[in-house]
Amino acid sequence: MNSLEFSLLVGLGSVAAGFLGSLTGLGGGVVIVPLLALVFGVDIRYAIGASLVSVIATSSGAAAAYVKEGYSNLRIGMFLEIATTIGALAGAFLAARMSPSAIAVIFGVVLFYSAYLSNRSRPERPEAAHPDPLATFLRMDSTYPTADGPQSYRVHNVPGGFGLMFVAGALSGLLGIGSGAVKVLAMDQVMRIPFKVSTTTSNFMIGVTAAASAGVYLSRGFIDPVLAMPVMLGVLAGSTLGARVLTRAKSRILRIVFSLVILALGVELIYNGLTGRL
């Protein structure tokens, strides 16, 4: 296979990864990293570097629209980004010192958890009675647009959400994924922020977190432009297509298909990691 054929195949695979990731809200990195490592035989650290570049590109495009529409809470995002950036730098430095096999096993476990999250129901949380003093001090309470007009909400348990954001950042830096699932979990379940605000604020944060990790990977030579370019363009095209299909697709069926795909990739990654094939 020559370089042109390799780039075309990687680009097509990235379109599929971005499409699947967009439909489930988990991002294309969850699929593209194991795809590059298992199918194309790419060193998993170079696969992670290429994935981080694609995460920055896809997040930047979607985040601007959500901020303009008034869903994203920039105060929450910028504050929590302190934790995710520190975690991302820690994860990226750790990845440079870990063996590809160990990273593959950790990635496989994260894929199992992502499969569970993608099929989990996400009910809107009822408003709690007492606001968080820190959230009040930082003026995080805000409103978001609904069909009935702006809906106000309060932010709770800021320290708990901040701690979980460090974990999300570390996973992003270690595995080259956006860690959107963990970020949404922290804001939706721990900080009790409305789900739409959680997902859109997470999308805004993903690109910043990935940029911090990408700097470390770039300095260590794990970002190859020949690999990163088709991955970035493919994931961007796939996620754009997925966002358009999302409104018409039967999300339950898509989530089941996606779960089966990443479960299979998770099993394959763990097997190859434990047997030293990666």
Image (tube, grey):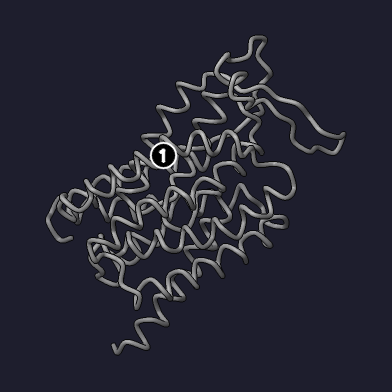
Residue at left offset 12%, top offset 54%: 275
Residue 223, percent from left and from top = 31, 67
Residue at 21% over, 46% down: 94
Residue farthest toward the right in the current orientation of the protein: 148
In screen coordinates, is 266 left or right of 252?
A: left
Q: Is residue 242 above or below residue 88?
A: below
Residue extending farthest to the top is 130
Quadrant the C terminus occupies: bottom left
Determine the residue positioned at 65% across, 41% down.
72
Query: Residue farthest to the left?
Result: 276
Give the residue type at disc 1.
Thr
**Residue 77 occupies which quadrant of the picture?**
top right
Residue 258 location (% of width, % of height): 49, 53
Q: Residue 102, relative to residue 81: is it above or below?
A: below
- In the image: residue 37, left or right of residue 198: left
Seen from the viewer's position, the closer of residues 184 and 91 is 91
Depicted 194 relative to depicted 258: above or below: above
Would you identify the image quadrant in which residue 1 lies? bottom left
Q: Secondary structure at mark 1?
A: helix
Disc tally is 1
x and y percentages locating residue 82 in the rendered image: 43, 36
| Residue 92 drawn at (x, y percent) | 28, 49
User: What residue did someone put label 1 on?
Assistant: 84
78 or 261, nearer to the observer: 78
Place residue 163 in its image quadrant: top left
Residue at image position (44%, 49%) is 178
Residue farthest along the front direction in this orientation: 137
Few, some or many residues within 10 Å of mark 1 (<14, 14–19, 20+) = many
